[in-house]
């Protein structure tokens, strides 16, 4: 999904001939897409903003019930330093609702934690067969100014 | 036999609106040799259609929840396996729940993906309430407007053979609306455990769990 926090990663993915990038209209499409990719033996990651996690909830039934591996990188809004009141309800609900659907949440607040946390998530998902969301917090990314 | 129709269905009105074909005959005829495809199905009706057709084969992944996901599971599978033909068989209700998927698929337009919407104009599993396709919504036009160039509606017996070819050929994603009577799918009991079905599917396709 388009997002300022994922901008560089989206650009790199688009430029990488070894990666297939799929632009989505809504985040739940990505959950189903990744399950289908797994049925075919491929791996993927869903890039989205915290506001989109709510759009995924029922589709995560597929992940939990089917024991599909699932990895998402979530750029957070509605937390540290947020100036847009619309972002708080979903931002603050990300962890409880994802955890309720069986997704393990790993929060990152400092730049030096990014690479080891994503490496840990890759192991947890593609060796451990789990569902993991890596939360890129606003303490890490900085809050958008209004 | 008119009294055998599901309770609450106005069959005369459905037939007058073009929902004429019997899904138990039309779906197998349209698909033909099922071994030509990997299948992803929607819930209830199409899951039973395809499970009955394949005797719940290892080349099918049927859903019983997560409504709105069938087309995108099919896209993920088609992108992962360009060497295989992927057929998404889903109902009008399931498709209506995530129309954005048609736009996402049209942008990529994989030639090894086909979508078959078995459209009975009703939510059969929940008591045959009318769906939007009974109320004027045209899924073929939505698919075409989303950018899927190979989109058509099949409502008569004579068109089934053409449809079968369309599912197998062409240089982009195919989309077929198959209009059928609002009548029950085959009463086939399939495996409804999503985890064991995943293991079964991957085992057959990839030789792994």
Image (cartoon, grey):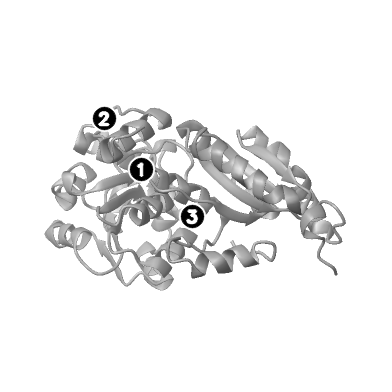
x then y, percent, for residue A1:
59, 61
Q: Secondary structure at mark 3?
A: loop
Dividing the picture into quadrants, the one containing residue A99 is top right
Viewer-proximal residue, B28 or A1? A1
Viewer-proximal residue, B120 or A100? A100
Q: Kindly identify which chain the residue marked by label 3 belongs to.
A: B
Horizontal side, residue A96 vs residue B174: left or right: right
x then y, percent, for residue A35:
45, 44
Horizontal side, residue A94 vs residue B5: left or right: right
Q: Are marks 3 and 2 on the same chain?
A: yes
Q: Kindly identify which chain the residue marked by label 2 belongs to.
A: B
Going from N to C along the chain, the mark reached first, 3 or 1, is: 1
Placement of the C terminus of chain B among the 4 image quadrants? top left
Q: Secondary structure at mark 2?
A: loop
Marks 3, 1: nearer the viewer: 3
Q: Which mark is residue B9?
A: 1
Placement of the N terminus of chain B among the 4 image quadrants? top left
Is residue B151 something that shows in the picture?
Answer: yes
Q: Which mark is residue B98?
A: 3
Say which residue label 2 marks: B188
The crowding category of the residue bearing disc 3, from other C-alpha atoms within 10 Å (few below 14, some 14 to 19, many at least 20), is many
Q: Kindly identify which chain the residue marked by label 1 belongs to.
A: B
The crowding category of the residue bearing disc 2, from other C-alpha atoms within 10 Å (few below 14, some 14 to 19, many at least 20), is some
Dividing the picture into quadrants, the one containing residue B203 is top left
Dividing the picture into quadrants, the one containing residue B141 is bottom left
Q: Residue at x 50, y 70 (%)?
A: A15
């Amino acid at each position: 999904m388009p997002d300022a926090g994922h901008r560089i990663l989206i650009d790199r993915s688009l430029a990488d001939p070894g990666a297939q990038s799929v632009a989505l209209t809504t985040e739940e499409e990505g959950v189903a897409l990744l399950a289908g990719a797994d049925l075919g033996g491929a791996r993927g990651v869903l890039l989205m903003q915290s506001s989109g996690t709510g759009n995924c909830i029922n589709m995560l039934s597929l992940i939990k019930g089917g024991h599909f591996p699932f990895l998402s990188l979530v750029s957070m809004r509605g937390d540290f330093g947020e100036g847009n009141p619309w972002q708080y309800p979903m931002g603050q609900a990300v962890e409880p609702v994802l955890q309720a659907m069986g997704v393990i949440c790993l929060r990152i607040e400092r730049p030096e934690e990014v690479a080891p946390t994503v490496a840990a998530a890759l192991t947890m998902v593609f060796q451990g067969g789990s569902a993991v969301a890596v939360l890129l917090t606003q303490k890490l990314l900085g809050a958008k100014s209004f | 036999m008119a009294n055998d129709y599901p309770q609450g269905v106005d069959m005369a009105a459905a037939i007058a609106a073009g929902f004429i074909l019997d899904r138990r005959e039309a779906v197998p005829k349209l698909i033909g040799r099922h071994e030509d495809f990997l299948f992803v199905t929607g819930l209830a009706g199409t899951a039973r259609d395809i499970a009955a057709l394949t005797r719940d084969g290892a080349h099918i992944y049927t859903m019983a929840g997560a409504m709105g996901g069938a087309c995108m599971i099919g896209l993920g599978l088609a992108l992962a396996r360009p060497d295989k033909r992927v057929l998404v068989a889903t109902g009008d209700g399931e498709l209506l729940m995530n129309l954005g998927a048609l736009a996402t698929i049209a942008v990529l337009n994989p030639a090894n993906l086909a979508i078959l919407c078995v459209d009975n104009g009703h939510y059969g599993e929940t008591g045959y309430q009318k769906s939007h396709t009974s109320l004027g919504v045209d899924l073929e036009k939505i698919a075409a407007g989303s950018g899927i160039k190979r989109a058509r509606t099949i409502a008569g017996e004579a068109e089934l053979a053409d449809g079968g070819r369309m599912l197998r050929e062409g240089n982009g994603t195919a989309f077929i609306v198959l209009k059928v009577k609002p009548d029950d799918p085959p009463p086939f009991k399939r495996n409804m455990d999503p985890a064991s079905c995943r293991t079964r599917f991957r085992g057959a396709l990839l030789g792994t769990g």
